[in-house]
Amino acid sequence: MQTDSLNKQGVQSLAEGVVRRDPRSLGRALSLVENGGREETYELIRALYPHSGRAIVVGVTGSPGTGKSTLTYELARKLRETGLTVGIIAVDPTSPFSGGAVLGDRIRMQGLAGDPGVFIRSMATRGLMGGLSPATADAVLVLDAAGFDRILIETVGVGQDEVDIARTAHLTAVLLVPGMGDDIQSIKAGVMEIADLFVINKSDLPGADKTRLEVESLLLMRSESLSEQIPIVKTVATTGEGIDRLLSTLEELQSRMEGTRRMEEAEIQRARRRIMELLRERVIRAVLRGIPPEHFQELVEQVRRRSTDPVSGVEELLGRTQFKGIV
Amino acid sequence: MQTDSLNKQGVQSLAEGVVRRDPRSLGRALSLVENGGREETYELIRALYPHSGRAIVVGVTGSPGTGKSTLTYELARKLRETGLTVGIIAVDPTSPFSGGAVLGDRIRMQGLAGDPGVFIRSMATRGLMGGLSPATADAVLVLDAAGFDRILIETVGVGQDEVDIARTAHLTAVLLVPGMGDDIQSIKAGVMEIADLFVINKSDLPGADKTRLEVESLLLMRSESLSEQIPIVKTVATTGEGIDRLLSTLEELQSRMEGTRRMEEAEIQRARRRIMELLRERVIRAVLRGIPPEHFQELVEQVRRRSTDPVSGVEELLGRTQFKGIV
């Protein structure tokens, strides 16, 4: 996405627009953080940070075909009914919010489009300068500073990237559908650890109870203490069935977590991760600025021809910069 | 995975063991690159690099349930029949190679276990120090230097990480199964661009022809020139049906690519990516060494309490290191 270059004052007024929840400013700010790693992005983060920290962020994750988008849509609709404002970030390439999926879904989603209390943004999932996870964290910052009460992040629950994104959320709901044995397997492997609750969507399909039992037995193996209960909620997102219960479960989990040691720990981890990401980004930019493109090209060619190895090459490259001796 | 610290000489003899294709050395070298970002890893890359560049690397990617592992297994078996040696890297958490999946699959896979011409390694998909994609690239380097003729990388084809891994391969086969409309959608969004060929596995299921048509129409939309044909191969991995054709298609694609501008471009991109990854890793390590842990902790706490923003904090942090003024 193209964004014009902004001076410090321009960023300041953009930040003010975000805090006013002006849709154009929101769109522009989100494009800025999506591009990442530039002076304006840093300025914007700086300006918005003091306004953030109020939104509750909920991750909705699951394999393609589990009905994440429909569920996210229904959640948003219910939240609006209770008067809360909602920001949606779709990081799922198959999401109708992102322009994937079939026409019918996309038409349904448009039901939210006219409402100023809802802002929907789909993130590019590829080719982001600074990586998907930092960009998502900053997009959350923008919507949070804009005063949205709840922020829903829709992701495909496979891969490290997605797990990282889930960690941006305060609570993560993992969606399953009946009869997907493979999914239960992949949960075992990783997603399990990020789930604060499980949703068995499409629970009108045969096998919903079997899926529930499988999840329960996995939870039994995992849970360190019996007191730590992870809820399982059955829904049929297409009819809205179970969404009320899902919402009240989410709110209950949130209030139960409030002020606990675990909540504090999660906040610390989030801060740590963001600092690390910025540190990384900042330093690598400085290094790349210090390396003439022709030196870089030359090394690429040498490594390709195997006349040098990448480790020795990088060392030599750094030796010709201001980082010589300190890296 | 634990690896003892190695001195330069130790790394040298480990590298020799790898080149000799000694299983213990291979296992140890792979653990080393999986841990990543350490002096020994760099030494090992340096030592192995001159021995690499001969293997043909094939990525096998697709959603959970498309039968990637069974197909990979059958491919490996056929390759062995032709006398070629095979390395397998399973980055798929649901792969039976990785210990996921059901017992039956795992028992079948053991058929390869006794054969010294096959080496199977499953990569941890989480918590890797340097990231999944660099670790996979280095694992390929190890197996390549060990002289395996073909290296098969099995990944789940969703997410940026997986796309990056696919780029490590010379050729990438994207698996589909009949009747997964959602999959076609997610292909649209990204995986499409990395596919050198499509495999419609489980093609004995109803809907295989429909899936083929869908892929063909997607290809028609994409292809810049009519000359660029992307093959579609139908298989039933569980019975071995179509595997011969898949293999000959792969070999044909490979020989067609040999020496072309596109091949060269891919090699350049691979070299560039590896250099960037190493540069990043190296610099960030140096920076972190320069920051006292207590300064870091302090900043995390300030960011968490929002008494500072992460951008200003990182600036201040760097200002206290040897990087002051140059980053």
Image (tube, coloured by chain):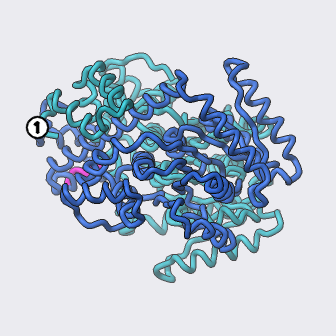
Chain colours: A cyan, B blue
Q: Is residue B194 left or right of residue B7?
A: right
Question: Which residue reaches farthest bottom?
Answer: A226
The C terminus of chain B, quarter of image:
top left
**Residue A56 shows in this picture:** no
Instruction: Name the residue nearer the viewer: A57 or B56.
Output: B56
- Give the amino acid at mark 1: Gly
- Residue B4, how many percent across, how many down? 26, 67
Which residue is pictured at 64% across the width and 34% down the height?
A: B253
Which residue is pictured at 70% across the width and 41% down the height?
A: B248
Q: Is residue B209 left or right of residue B216?
A: right
Q: Is residue B55 left or right of residue B229?
A: left
Instruction: Name the residue nearer the viewer: A144 or B40.
Output: B40
Q: Main secondary structure of the magenta part?
A: helix
Instruction: Tell me if residue B301 is in the magenta stretch.
Output: yes
Instruction: Name the residue nearer the viewer: B164 or B11.
Output: B11
In the figure, A56 relative to A224: above or below? above
Instruction: Name the residue nearer the viewer: A181 or B271.
Output: B271
Callout 1: SS: loop
Question: Which residue reaches farthest front?
Answer: B83
The boundaries of the magenta stretch are B298-303
- Residue A29, how many percent across, how many down? 45, 29
Name the chain under label 1.
A
State the residue position of label 1: A325
Q: Residues within 10 Å of mark 1 (few under 14, many from 20)?
A: few
- Residue B211, how many percent across, how many down? 81, 41
Instruction: Tell me if residue A327 is in the magenta stretch.
Output: no
Which residue is pictured at 13% across the width and 33% down the height?
A: A324
- Residue A182, how many percent across, how many down? 68, 63
Question: Which residue reaches farthest right?
Answer: B206
Q: Is residue A44 left or right of residue A200?
A: left
The N terminus of chain B, quarter of image:
bottom left
Which residue is pictured at 62% across the width and 29% down the height?
A: B256
